[in-house]
Image: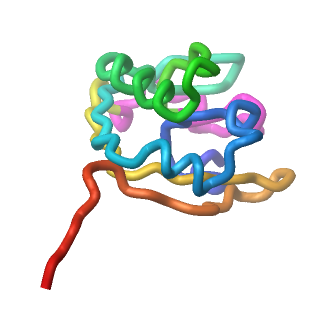
Amino acid sequence: MQARLIAAHVTLCREDEIADLDRVRLFERLRGVGPLRLEFGPAERFQGHGILLPCVAGEADFQAMRREVLGSAARGHAPHLTLAHPRNPRAAGNLLLDSPGLPRHIAITFLAVSMIRQYGGQPWQQLGRTTLGPAVVSAD
């Protein structure tokens, strides 16, 4: 269910945090910020039938990236990967917390940031994307 609405991701900023920040300004604030490596631990249930993988390493870098974008307005927000969101209908897979198919540990290096938006219950749409890391300059 979750994958039909949005691909796996880590939310950097919530919509209310960037309400006054358009895509261009958001991406400008990320200029020069390098790739982000996060490590996630075993699946956990949250808010009923939600399932997430909690961040177990790299959170300090994630919080630094949030401060780069939001400045002093950055509030606490723990990075995680949502496998099943509790606002979506319960699915059979939501009961498989101990499934051998779920990783006990996974490390991911994020190379880009996207701005996305959802209208109603429709799948999320990507409004823009920027890569993380130093600007690549080529000369002829």
Please tell me whether residue 46 is drawn above or below residue 101 in the rendered image: above
- Residue 41 makes an appearance in the image: no
Q: Residue 36: x, y in percent?
A: 32, 37
**Chief secondary structure of the magenta portion:** loop
Q: Of residues 52 and 125, which is closer to you in this image?
A: 125
Of the 4 image quadrants, the one containing the C terminus is bottom left
Depth check, front residue: 11 or 8: 11
Q: Residue furthest bottom?
A: 140
Question: From the viewer's perspective, is 78 left or right of 57?
Answer: right
Quarter of the rendering containing residue 137:
bottom left
Toward the viewer: 132 or 29?
29
Identify the residue at horizontal 66%, vertical 33% (top origin).
Answer: 14
Q: Is 115 one of the magenta-colored residues?
A: no
Q: Is residue 131 left or right of residue 47?
A: left
Q: Residue at x 72, y 29 (%)?
A: 86
Q: Nearer the viewer, residue 77 or 42?
A: 77
Location of residue 105 with respect to 75 vertically, above or below: below
Residue 35, placed above or below residue 87: below
Outermost residue to the front: 139
Q: Quadrant of residue 19?
A: top right
At 60% from the left edge and 34% from the top edge, which residue is drawn?
A: 13
Residue at the farthest left position: 140
Tell how many labels. 0
Query: Residue 92 magenta-drawn?
Result: yes
The colour scheme applied to this rendered structure is rainbow
| 134 relative to 30 in the view: left or right | left
Q: Which residues are the magenta region?
A: 82-102
Q: Position of residue 87 (x, y in %)?
A: 77, 33
* Left or right position of 15 against 31: right
Residue 125 spot, x, y in % from top left: 67, 61
Question: In the rendered image of this protein, does residue 91 appear above or below residue 97?
Answer: below
Q: Position of residue 81 (x, y in %)?
A: 48, 33
